Amino acid sequence: MATTAAEMAGRLGQRVRVVLARSRRPALLIAPLAAGALGAVLAVTLVARQDAEIGPATVRLSVRPALSGSSRLAVPPFGSVSAHTHVGPLQFRATLDDVDVARLNQALAEDEVPGGLRRSSLHTALAPLEQDARQAAREFLLRLTAVGLGGGLAGVLLFGRRSARRLAGCAAGGALAMAVLLVPSVATYDVFAFRAPRYEGSLQYAPALVGDVRTGFDRLQTLRDEMARITANLNRAYAALSRPVPVLDGSTVRVLHIADVHLNPAGFDLAEQLADKFDVAAVVDSGDMGTWGLAQERGVARRVRDFRVPYLFVKGNHDNPAMVAAVRANPNARVLDDAAVTVSGIRFHGVPDPVFSPGQGFRNPEFERLKERRSVQLAATLDGQSVRADVLVVHDPLLARYAIGHVATVLEGHLHSFGSQVVSGTRELRTGTVGGAGPDGLRAKQPVPYTAEVLYFDPDTRRPVAVDRITVGALESSFSVDRELLDEGANGFVLDPVEVPADLLPPPQPDEVQGQPPGVTARRPLGA
């Protein structure tokens, strides 16, 4: 019996050794591949750099692994512009190290015309820049490939025992890693993705680097036009060191859209800077300048007169009649109380929030039902206008729910967050809180950012073709701009009303809210 047990143990041990030997063979093959791939990635991240001379500028090119493919152009000290340019796990970076401003000005000074440079000047001044950029890109890709393959070969240093087989495996791993990194990035690269850039940096230089959207639409048809836009904006940005306010061109009508100041003076400070830097034609305030309705709150409305453009305001659910009257007292204010006003050819129709809700949260279902009914009446009002409004301005999106399809654009606030969607041909644009949610923001676990948006209207279709969403973390310390292109803005609006539930079709009676606690204002139906 003992002999039999010993034989069985020996056989079992032999089988285990066979299994281990077999399992080591794949490991022996995979380990060099993994080491080579790791070496290639580390080499690309840590070593791949190249300084390129592009016309009057010296640009440092680099790359790093990333979760999504993007490209970033950094222009110290102004900030950086980035865009999702390709599919692949790489972020390409170009950092401006030096520029000969005199040469740059000389290249762009010839024959400027409104809206951009003359085409002959583009051919003369920018063709060498385009050639330099293409050559720099080719050289950088070759350098990147060589560095990655070298890093793959260096992966063999991870092994105590080195052999030709392991060296070949590391080389194969490096080549495989570079193929995964580079092939999809190069194959899908789209320079026109910079039509919708993201800007990060100083608020002062955002308009200069991002540029006017209509100018972008006109110029971004070829790589040469893209080079013109970048170079012209660079020139404006460097000139901005001595002239803080950048010059914006283009034919779009720019409008600053804010909401939910909530008594915060810093919100007005930010709004004033944006109105000035982006050279807007008007400020549209979607309401909630106040918070609790106290008499002391009205003083904040005096800040409206500091804006040098028309200030269009609609009442929010935290604005009482006294606050509305205080806003109206400013000479540049236009309170939209079921009324319309035209600015730079764009007609804005505003509807005040019918409730004053602080302390009455228990009545929210009643308030929501009232606003939905008002939205049905509002649709009829818009259809009955002799001059149809281009933009509907409300505080609570519920007030526009069934006016969708009756107007081209709806501007709203209330929810303290950005939003954008197209429903039945109507573009809804919701801005965040320019006052960082006011007193409520101070009680939040995480700081509420200060937010606003700049809309770019096509003067022909009178619809927005793009929106820049501005987010400020702590004032002047964290700033970003995200641009969204609105393709439908290039075409005229076509009516496409949304379906209204049968139970909302009968209009509410004028006295339906009379006799209730003081939170709902009894109003006659719109259009009556």
Image: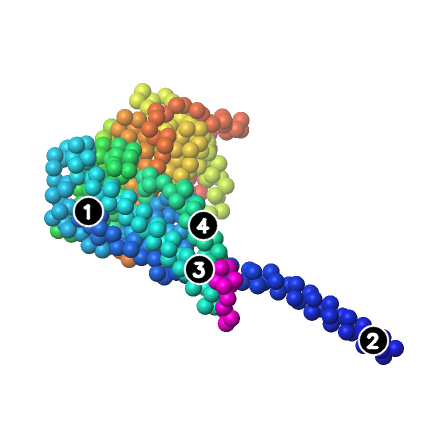
Does residue 164 belong to the magenta stretch?
Answer: yes
Within 10 Å of disc 2 (Cα), the crowding (few <14, some 14-19, many 20+) is few
- Assign a secondary structure to mark 1: loop
Residue 53 image position (x, y, % from top left): 22, 51
* Mark with earlier residue (3, 2): 2
- Assign a secondary structure to mark 4: helix
Residue 206 image position (x, y, % from top left): 25, 47
* Mark with earlier residue (2, 1): 2
Q: Is residue 216 visible?
A: no
Q: Which mark is residue 5?
A: 2
Q: CA distance from mark 3 to mark 1?
A: 35 Å
Q: Quadrant of residue 448?
A: bottom left
Q: Quadrant of residue 466?
A: top left
Q: CA distance from mark 2 to mark 1?
A: 84 Å
* Count of residue discs: 4
The boundaries of the magenta stretch are 159-170
- Assign a secondary structure to mark 2: helix
Q: CA distance from mark 3 to mark 2?
A: 50 Å
Q: Which residue is mark 4?
A: 179
* Mark with earlier residue (2, 4): 2
* Mark with earlier residue (1, 4): 1
Q: Which residue is mark 1?
A: 55
Q: CA distance from mark 3 to mark 4?
A: 12 Å
Within 10 Å of disc 1 (Cα), the crowding (few <14, some 14-19, many 20+) is many
Amino acid type indicated by mark 1: Gly
Q: Specify the farthest residue to the right.
A: 1
Q: Which residue is mark 3?
A: 152
